[in-house]
Amino acid sequence: MRANRKFAKTLRDRGCAAMLAALFGICARGQSLEPAGRVIDILADHDSRYKMPGQKQPIITVRAGEPITLRVTAKKAKNVNRDGAIHGFTLLRAKDRSPVDGWDFMLKPGVQEFSLVAPGEPGEYVVVCTVICSQDHEGMNMKFVVLPSPGIATDKGKEY
């Protein structure tokens, strides 16, 4: 028992606790203390719509494999999920509506940050709400575009 306390004290003294938590995945999925990459602000609003500052129709545009942080502010709509979620945020491939692994989040009231890596496959995607947040829930979606990474040749031989 004494050895365990000494080991824990050593870790605390050296500031290793945060590093160990990250290594063993103790931090919440998709969340980190410091934003990674470009920060993209999104509002999941009370009127069952996704919104982005300065955009009439919200569209997220990223490069394949780009590290990003989604900073999502969720405002309560009419309904609340049993787990307290008020909105969902799920990324689907536009061509077949299949989900993208690691891109499915339940949003609770307030601000949440998700540090992610953009999908590696260029193309069009769609973000959908997966919580029946109100009668207007079906309209809660937005476009998500993944461009090829710089220096990657496309099928037409051009580089981006």
Image: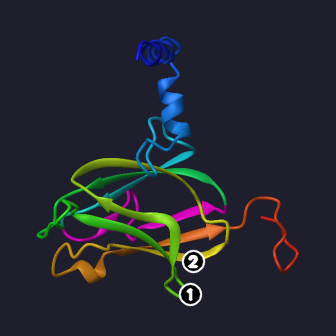
- Image quarter where the N terminus lies is top left
Q: Which mark is residue 95?
A: 1
Instruction: Name the spot of residue 2 as percent of width and height, x first.
Output: 42, 12
Q: Quadrant of residue 134?
A: bottom left
Q: Residue furthest bottom?
A: 96
Distance from Cα at disc 2 to Cα at disc 1 = 8 Å
Instruction: Name the spot of residue 91 as percent of width and height, x first.
Output: 47, 71
Q: Main secondary structure of the magenta part?
A: loop
Q: Quadrant of residue 130?
A: bottom left
Camera-nearest residue between 11 and 143: 11
Callout 2 crowding tier (Cα within 10 Å): few <14, some 14–19, many ≥20 = some
Amino acid type assigned to the residue bearing label 2 in the image? Glu
Q: Secondary structure at mark 1?
A: loop
Is the residue 31 above or below the residue 46 in the image? above
Label 2 with label 1: CB-CB less than 8 Å:
yes
Is the residue 102 above or below the residue 11 in the image? below
In the picture provided, is 150 more to the left or to the right than 129?
A: right
The residues colored magenta run 47-64
**Residue designated by label 2:** 124
Amino acid type assigned to the residue bearing label 1 in the image? Lys
Q: Residue furthest right?
A: 157
